[in-house]
Amino acid sequence: MGLSRQTRQSRRNDGAEELTATARIDLAKPLDAKYLKRVVSLSRAKGSSPWRWYKEIGEVHYAVSRGAKIAGYAKLGAYTVDKNGKIGKQVTTGMAAEIAARLSSPYGGTRGLVDRFFTLTKIPGDAYLIRCRDEEGNIEGYDFISADEIDQASIEGIDGQGTGKVFSPNQSIRRITLPMNNGDGLGIDVEARDFIGRVWRPAGRFVDVADSPMFALETTCELLHLLTINLKAKLMSRMALNGILFVPSEINDIQGGTGPKPVDGEVFHDNRVLDELIRASTYAVMNYESPEAAIPIFMTGPGAFGDMIKHIIYDREIYRVDMELRQELIDRILMGLDVQPQNVRGLGDSNHWSAWAVSDEERRVNIQPDLETMCWALTRLVLWREMEEAGQKPGAILKTVIWYDMTDANVKTNLAEDARQMLDRQAISDSAARRMSGISEADAPTDEEYIRNVGRKMSDPYLATYGLAEADNIEWDKVGKAQPGPNAASPGDKPKSGPGVGDPGSPNDKTSNTPKRLRPA
């Protein structure tokens, strides 16, 4: 059987179509070994430039690493799924839960695993999933690696036609962990059975070619890099930054100055004025803590030439244009990476509603689609594969998937109020309300405190003092008599007023000629 590949087309929350592919790689199969050799070679060639800009352009590095840090708040787990693909409840027991608990990287745990995938998706657009083992051969997690980490020499022996050398289970591929120019780098061996598969974003032209947003930003990144170098050269140029001090050649002698006198015969220029100015200026810079460095440079000479000494400053308007162009290039790069520019430049005077909207938009467009892609890949390449190898039935396998929980990444400032409202409506648990409010589980009330809280709400003195030592000293008979309102057993007082007896028109007036039915009640 040849290479097992599958693509997934999903609709992002912003309505855009996104195509993602995974490939199970079994290096014992000739076609899989041939496939790995070719895609690694292509990915290494295409990914060199994006990695360069990620390393040299701070805005690119910050945008990608910031998104990776936000994605790292995701908690992975096994969840049920219905026939319509809707995610259900988390599975906490059984084989699926055990497999999901192992989804972490030896290099940073679950956050490290998510961080690596997110970075590789944004930079080369190509990631390879491996299983990690300790020195004793026990599984200690998983990790996503780039094509640059795969030693090309360890797969060079694969026959390009797919009919020659393949890998046996005890053979290994070399993972480069510390490259060195002299070849004396560090690496670890990954057994062929632990090389699980490839996850990539297919290009629009060729499905097996990985696509990355950095490929379309190649020219923009290069322009930004050249502009930055140009600005650096201008800032380091003394003529462009500090201008020129013009001294007429007619002034040859001066008297005075600041600082120690030069040694006899120590002359640097034909013009002694320049020599004195350079000496005094250098002394002020090198001895800035000295009081003499703060006083002006005193000079005396022909009065007719005093006004001819000029400090010429060049027009710096070019700096404003350069900075505007640089900001435009940065915005184009950030938009190409699906990052809101406000998240990098800052929100400025935006109110908290705008801040929430920007943060929510970033998670919907930039974070969650890649998390869904990673979970889908981990479901196919790890969860379903291991359950299948364990002999689970297909019907049981397809009902469980790997999914994520981004609750910890919620940055709404009124989350505590939302928790209180949901707790009052019995929509969440007490522990969830504490977590959303930023309260530790160590501060949860004990069972006795919970009963006393209920007693205070019900105005029940017995429950309000439940478990307290002083409750035994309370005379509960007296507490029971102190009830609000009249005592039900006491006789009522005789009313001070009532219906009239002899008044005309009263109900008891026997002499009235008014019919009874017309009399007042």
Image: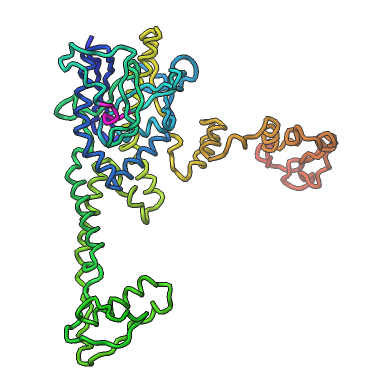
Question: Which residues make up the magenta segment?
Answer: 145-151
Relative placement, left or right, of 292 versus 510 is: left
Of 472 and 241, nearer the camera is 241
* Residue 437, image x, y percentages: 53, 40
Of 512 and 242, nearer the camera is 242
* Residue 455, image x, y percentages: 70, 35
Relative placement, left or right, of 104 versus 474 is: left
Quarter holding residue 109: top left
Of 300 and 390, nearer the camera is 300
Q: Is residue 150 magenta?
A: yes
Figure coloring: rainbow
454 versus 296 height, above or below? above
Of 478 and 57, nearer the camera is 57
Quarter holding residue 78: top left
* Residue 194, image x, y percentages: 35, 18
Quarter holding residue 310: bottom left
Please tell me which residue is depicted at 25% across the width and 12% down the height of the picture: 29
315 versus 184 height, above or below? below
Please tell me which residue is depicted at 35% across the width and 14% down the height of the picture: 385
Count of all numbered marks drawn on residues in the image: 0
Q: Which image quadrant: the N terminus?
A: top left
Please tell me which residue is depicted at 24% across the width and 67% down the height of the picture: 238
Q: Is residue 287 magenta?
A: no
